[in-house]
Image (cartoon, helix red, strand yellow):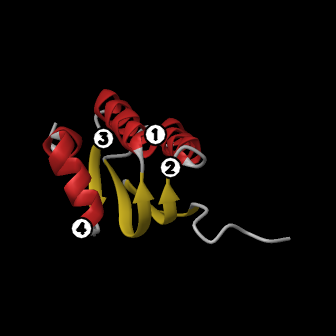
Amino acid sequence: MTTHPHHLQLTTAETQDSVRIELHGDLDYDNADRLVQEATAQLAARPALTDLHLHCADLGMVDSMGLCALLMIGRRTAAAGVLLHLDDRPAQLDRLLDLTGTLDHLTAPL
């Protein structure tokens, strides 16, 4: 079986009050739902969660569906009273968030 080299892989690590999801690969039309599902599952399973960290260092390309996924996660974390962190963002993600004016929206304190 061959795996697409840019297929999104998620690695989740938990502590008592935070979750870290490491993103490896592209966040695009084919993969965005996986990230939303994982983040939503973590929020639902952990009502005492205070911080959700998305570790983006190994994130590849992000398309409009990937941006939508990040915005959806931002809405869900805000509704749950959880701080969203976009850690170790690559330059291309910073450019996208800057162009769309969504960085402050996604990472603003509650």
Residue beneath disc 3: 82
Q: Are marks 1 and 2 in contact (CB under 8 Å)?
A: yes
Q: Nearer the viewer, residue 102 or 49?
A: 102
Q: Where the N terminus falls, by quadrant?
A: bottom right
| Distance between the alpha carbons at the discs numbered 1 and 4 | 18 Å
| Distance between the alpha carbons at the discs numbered 1 and 2 | 6 Å
**What amino acid is at disc 4?**
Ala
- In the rendered image, the residue lying farthest to the top is 79
User: For the point 21% across and 59% down, which residue is it?
Assistant: 94
Mark nearer the N terminus (4 vs 2): 2
User: For the point 50% across and 38% down, which residue is it?
Assistant: 40
**What amino acid is at disc 1?**
Met
Residue beneath disc 2: 28
Report the disc number at residue 65: 1
Dot 4, crowdedness within 10 Å: few (<14), some or many (≥20)?
A: few
Mark nearer the N terminus (1 vs 4): 1
Q: Is residue 38 left or right of residue 107?
A: right
Q: Is residue 40 left or right of residue 55?
A: right
Q: Secondary structure at mark 4?
A: helix
Q: Position of residue 42 (x, y in %)?
A: 51, 45
Nearer the camera: disc 2 or disc 3: 2
Dot 1, crowdedness within 10 Å: few (<14), some or many (≥20)?
A: some
Mark nearer the N terminus (4 vs 3): 3
Q: Position of residue 56 (x, y in %)?
A: 37, 65
Residue beneath disc 4: 91
Q: Are marks 4 and 2 in contact (CB under 8 Å)?
A: no
Q: Where the C terminus falls, by quadrant?
A: top left
